[in-house]
Amino acid sequence: MTLAPQRGGWVIFASIVVAYMLTIVPLPEWGRLARPEWAALVLIYWCMAVPHRVGVIVAWLVGLGQDAVQATLLGQHALAYAIMAYLVLRLHQRIRIYPLPQQALIVLLLLLLVHVIQAWISALVDQPTPGMAYWLPPVVGTLLWPWIFILMRGVRRRFSVQ
């Protein structure tokens, strides 16, 4: 068995950096409340597209970076993203065959799981309970998923990420 050369690692890294940049771009108050979890959406895509390259360890590292970017409790995003990546890796062959609307529903469940884990960790360290607006980003991420999927698939094909 010969191993195919792995190309496009820089594309994966660049997409994660772009996700971080979208996370810190200044928005008005209403926009900040609805900002999707860009890093989580990018991780979901790469875990589905190239599961042999992007896995739980990468998700953990991206989560640590997200903690640093958002100045949250160190490890909060890391734990949530690692659990999310594990689930995507376990189910990636099933998720990939679904049409985009059904994929979007699975993405909604994954993003809600990330938010539940983060709310649980926040409650453990006695931070205030989030309000209803806390649950808006998973919905926005779900609505954006079809376009993110199409864009990322185009990038993956254009740069032959394997």
Image (cartoon, grey):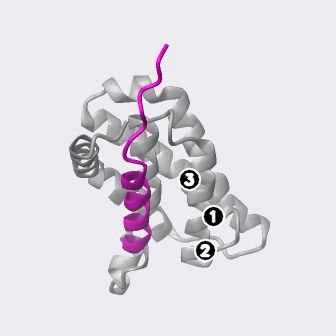
Q: Which residue is mark 2?
A: 68
Foreground pick, 81 / 15? 15
Work out whether 74 lies above or below 109. Answer: below
Question: Residue 94 in the image: x percent, y percent?
Answer: 41, 23
Foreground pick, 51 / 23? 51
Q: Are marks 3 and 1 in contact (CB under 8 Å)?
A: no
Q: Amino acid at mark 2?
A: Ala
Question: Residue 1 in the image: x percent, y percent?
Answer: 49, 13
The residues tagged by marks 2 and 3 sit, at their Cα atoms, a distance apart of 17 Å
Instruction: Tell whether position 13 is magenta.
Output: yes
Q: Amino acid at mark 1?
A: Leu
Q: Residue shown at 63%/64% (left/top)?
A: 64
Q: Are marks 2 and 1 in contact (CB under 8 Å)?
A: yes
N-terminal-most mark, 2 or 3: 2
> For the residues carrying marks 3 and 1, which lies nearer the camera in this image?
1
The residues tagged by marks 2 and 1 sit, at their Cα atoms, a distance apart of 6 Å
Predominant SS along the magenta part:
helix
Q: Amino acid at mark 3?
A: Val
Q: Is residue 117 visible?
A: no
Q: Quadrant of residue 124?
A: bottom right
Q: On the picture, is 57 further left or further right than 54?
A: right
N-terminal-most mark, 3 or 1: 1
Question: Residue 7 in the image: x percent, y percent?
Answer: 38, 42
Q: Which residue is mark 3?
A: 114
Region rendered in magenta: 1-22
Q: Is residue 110 visible?
A: yes
Q: Which mark is residue 64?
A: 1
